[in-house]
Amino acid sequence: MGDKKHTLTLTDNATGKAIELPVRYGTEGPPAVDIGPLYRDFGYFTYDPGFVSTGSCRSAITFIDGDQGVLLYRGYPIEQLAEKSTFLEVAYLLLYGELPSQDQLDGFTNVIVRHTMINESLKSFYQGFYHDAHPMATMVGVVGSLSAFYHDSTDIRNPQHREIAAHRLIAKMPTIAGASYKHSIGEPFVYPKNSLSYAGNFLRMMFAVPSEEYVVDPVAEKALDLIFILHADHEQNASTSTVRLAGSSGANPFACIASGIAALWGPAHGGANEAVLRMLAQIGDVKHIPQYLAKAKDKNDPFRLMGFGHRVYKNYDPRARIIRKMCHEVLEKVGDQHDPLFELALRLEELALKDDYFIERKLYPNVDFYSGLIYKALGIPTNMFTVMFAIARTVGWVAQWMEMIGEPDQKIGRPRQIYDGPAARDYLPIRRRKSAPHGAGTADLNGEARNTD
């Protein structure tokens, strides 16, 4: 587990000065060059847009090997957890590092169940949002407001406070999400029911109404629990990095998770499964698939197959192998067999998997391709897709946040930059200034912005 004695020598050809940089090793994955001494001893920063080659932390939670298509939670392959585990068991694993005994799982489940209610005052908070507000906008606001209600769990230096905050966030996120949806469609909120599973409880809060009984569909419940497992954590992605960066400042856990939700909202991160359905709608009909496959192969055509390929996985997304089987099961037992969108998606999958162009480039369907289809089959509207992602990823966020806060050498995140602006210059009085080539716009009499050019 400790670092091997290995260094990398870096030489500045201009000055002839050399520096020894330590090389750090984890239990899995490539080694990392420790560049800490680089600026202190050499006066250089590193430049890595998007941090694609930079390790920002040490973590024992999740490991990804994108070349081999491997995803491990605390060392356990995602395939085994998806087949044999439940979401709350996986949540315990991510939080505490080991799979629970039966007593531990029962105790953890009981704690989560007992914290699913939200403060009644929050119900009026929802009324401050416009009726057609996007549920993610509501989620950001409501989750951020939790620190105003739970002062007994905001001392980040207190391990008990951190734990109870983690439990509250995991427990309350489905309730907050369900209420966000109900508010958006003008229906009354549905209280959680402690006798139901985590996924079953959420389905009831989404779709039940006070005027009739609601029975959870076991296929829908199983599918949702599986999706939650597959989305629980994914190493240092944009939203997780955002949570860690916010947490490094000492912000309370509710604010940190709200920042993660905001980052997840971006279409390049959490909106991929929505993009899949928009793409299918654009294709429109099975007979148009060959035409759009040709467009996807044309490098001069902006059209891309959404839900195919992955930035991290250069091989098949291991989560996609798992969810594909569940997707077909859901479409067979729950979905509308006559929905042309489902027929279109399955035919597109079939043709793309046989096409040499996509096979050679390893552009296989990823988890987002199938999760969007499952959500649609379950009756979950498109604007709730990213909310579903947030419910599942909350577990990973709080696990990563707890790990970071517990580090003895934890320090505030402070990336550096390469400055490309003007060199130092003196202030000029306004009478001596010339108009800039691209001046700021001014408002005309109708309030329309117009350029000063």
Image: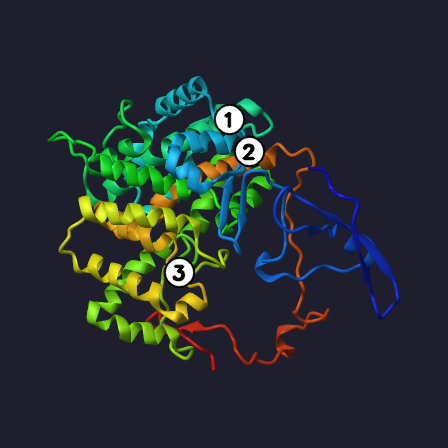
Residue at coordinates 31% horizontally, 40% vertically from top-left?
224
The image quadrant of residue 39 is bottom right
Measure how far apart labels 3 and 2 are at the Cα level.
34 Å
Front in this rendered view, residue 109 or 134? 109
The residue positioned farthest toward the top in the image shown = 103
Earlier-in-chain disc, 1 versus 2: 1
Between residue 246 and residue 151, name the one nearer to us: 246
Q: Can the viewer see residue 13?
A: yes
Seen in the picture, residue 357 relative to 149 is either above or below; the reply is: below
Q: Which residue is mark 1?
A: 163
Q: Are marks 1 and 2 in contact (CB under 8 Å)?
A: yes
Query: What is the tally of numbered marks visible in this picture?
Result: 3
Residue occupying the point 27% across, 36% down: 221
Amino acid carrying label 2: it is: Met
Graded by Cα atoms within 10 Å as few (under 14), some (14 to 19) or many (20 or more), the crowding at tag 1 reads: some
Q: Is residue 24 above or below residue 340?
A: above
Residue at horizontal 35%, vertical 24%?
113
Q: Earlier in the sequence, mark 3 or mark 2?
A: 3
Q: Which is nearer the N-term, disc 3 or disc 1?
A: 1
Amino acid type at mark 3 = Tyr
